[in-house]
Image (spheres, rainbow, N blue to C red):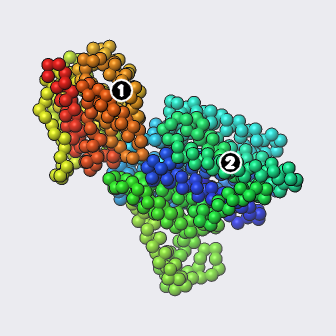
Amino acid sequence: MSTSSTSPVRSSRPSVRYPGLDGMRALAAAIVLVYHLIPGAAPAGLIGVDVFFVISGYLITRLLINEYERNSRIELKAFWLRRLRRLFPALAFMVLVCVALAALVGGDALVKARLQTITALTYTYNWAQIATGSDYFAASDPLLLTNVWSLAIEQQFYIVWPLVLLVIVRWRGRAIVPGLLAIASATSMAIISGTNLSRAYYGTDTHLFGLMIGAILAMIISGRAPRPSSPRLVRLVGLWGPAGWLAVAVLAAIGTQIYDDDRGLYIWGLPVASLASAIIIRAVMPDVTVASAMARGLCAILEHPVLVWIGTRSYGLYLWHWPLLVLANYQWPSASPYLVGACVAALSLALAEISLRYVEDPMRRAGIIATLRAWGAIVVASFRRGPHRLRGDSSTMTFRHLSVGRRIVTLAMTTVTAAAVVLASVGLAVAPTKTTLQMQIDAARAQLDQHNDARRNGAAPQGTASPKPTEPSPPPSDKKPPATDEDKTGNVSLSFIGDSVMLAASPAITARWPKALVDAEVSRAMPSIDHLISRQLAADSLGDVVIVGLATNGTIRDDQIEGVLHAIGADRRLVLVNGYSRPKARWVIDANAAIDNAARQHPDRVFVANWHTVAADHQDLLASDQTHPRKAGIDLYVKTLHSAINEAATSLDGH
């Protein structure tokens, strides 16, 4: 996200500042931070990225058109160099520091760090995540640098769009081109989001519409439009003022009233948010603020010094907040999300200021290479007694010539940078390609396949002890696990249908119930239940007690549970395993409510395995995603199932 509308290098070009845009950046950054740091406060706060896209599309297109109108040409090399100087130093600084911190945290914080670092620094992160099948919306084991996907899209735009603009800049109907591209992009997102939401969200092609909407506005309105010359024109132009306030309300409504797992957000929500952003930009242009008191009020708010100050640091805020949040969650997985959010926001703001003052501004003004040389010269001068000549400078300097503050900052930055380089290098060298949880699930998958193969081949699966955990046994807890009665299943057959939580625990399940049928898969949700039950009924393998654990990846509706009860028949019992997850996973709350309601409605047929309460009381036994049980927590999960299964088995005739 570009945070400057003026040239980042010395130039004879006149400097142009567009009012209100820094304030828009501040608000866009704020809603993204709220979305990530305060669970549930802005469930669709990701629209802040689309606000940034519109601002960038408008500014870059307008600056290029201004240059063409002045000089009858666009200096592509100079433009690309300015973009590189503006964006790359802050990104490289953040990546270096955060990978170094991840090396200190260790473990899952370093997963895929090599791939992430390379693709982040080459602005190909979004396509790399698409190629590897990464799920942007997965709550478990988030990647360290996920937020740089949007920077990759913007940099790709900066490379390709000037070439397109060179072709169409002289056309009378040039705005048609970005208009068609915006329509094609939004349509693609709407279609692809139905089958692969992460592909739709990550793709440059599917997420281009915000940049193109900004470009359309830049082609139609210069930002320095003449003041309206007649009363009628004043009234017409002044209508943009109330339209701007309406657009603010639309953004607020989308950001707080729609959820990020609602497909409607990707069919119409993000395009509408982008259009609303363009309307706000238009509403604070000088010709509108002259004609409308409402526009002047909106502009005054967006030009408030606090918002302007935050807006000039919004790029850094966006860069730092996500990696710091990921590191904090890996280091302190059970900490209050609100405390973590407050600390991450404060630290992000501090690091954004440091980055702006000591990295971004010097490199934007003097260039990356020249700044690095100057830093090196200062470091050398700090350790020399005699005079030292700065390269390219006729003056000489010694350590005594530096102020005390400059000496401290220089030595501190040198030490920290050297340590960060060493730590980051070590971290990249040892970075795993899979998380601990992924390896646990893969191992469970292999054992479950063996168990099910034995059942299909007619061999009686033998119950074997669960593999010894590699983790130390947890310390004694004053919170008692659920009581486990003796096994009352007898000859009652069991069918388990579940998601990755059940899959992770499947070795212990098959060890406890060797004859049970266990069907568990990653990312499985309740909509698949009808097909799964029908398949087992057709194979005559559905057990007398059906245990369903599908509350992790999506909501569960009352009618879906009623459909399961109808499908399994009155002679079978249903055990529903409720879910536990971080507060952001609102669907788990809804799913658990539906499960409780079904148990109240059908007390003789539906039984609840209350994993939610058990997990909440033993969060230290959960993986870093605060959803799946670690190896040390799997026994508690199985005991929770055992208690509910015993109740269900007892309720059957003859028990």
Q: Residue furthest right?
A: 230
- Mark 1 lies on a secondary structure that is helix
Q: Which residue lies furthest to the left in this view?
A: 486
Picture layout, residue 378 above or below residue 183: below
Q: In the rendered image, which residue does mark 1 sit on?
A: 561
Q: What residue type is labelled 2?
A: Ala
Query: Dot 1: within a 10 Å radius of its alpha carbon, few (fewer than 14), some, or many (20 or more) residues?
Result: many
Which percent across, then down, holds residue 85?
Answer: 62, 60
Q: Quadrant of residue 341?
A: bottom left
Q: Nearer the viewer, residue 140 or 552?
A: 552
- Mark 2 lies on a secondary structure that is helix
Looking at the rendering, in which quadrant would you find the C terminus?
A: top left
Q: What residue type is labelled 1?
A: Ile
Q: Quick check: marks 1 and 2 in contact, CB under 8 Å?
A: no
Q: Which mark is residue 278?
A: 2
Mark 1 or 2: in front is: 1
Q: Which of marks 1 and 2 is nearer the N terminus?
A: 2
Rendered residue at 71%/38% (across/down): 179
Rendered residue at 65%/80% (across/down): 394
Which percent across, then down, holds residue 422?
Answer: 40, 62
Rendered residue at 38%/29% (across/down): 558
Which percent across, then down, holds residue 463?
Answer: 16, 29
Query: Dot 2: within a 10 Å radius of its alpha carbon, few (fewer than 14), some, or many (20 or more) residues?
Result: many
| Left or right of 640 in this view: 276 | right
Picture layout, residue 57 above or below residue 568: below
Rendered residue at 79%/56% (across/down): 291
Q: Which mark is residue 608?
A: none
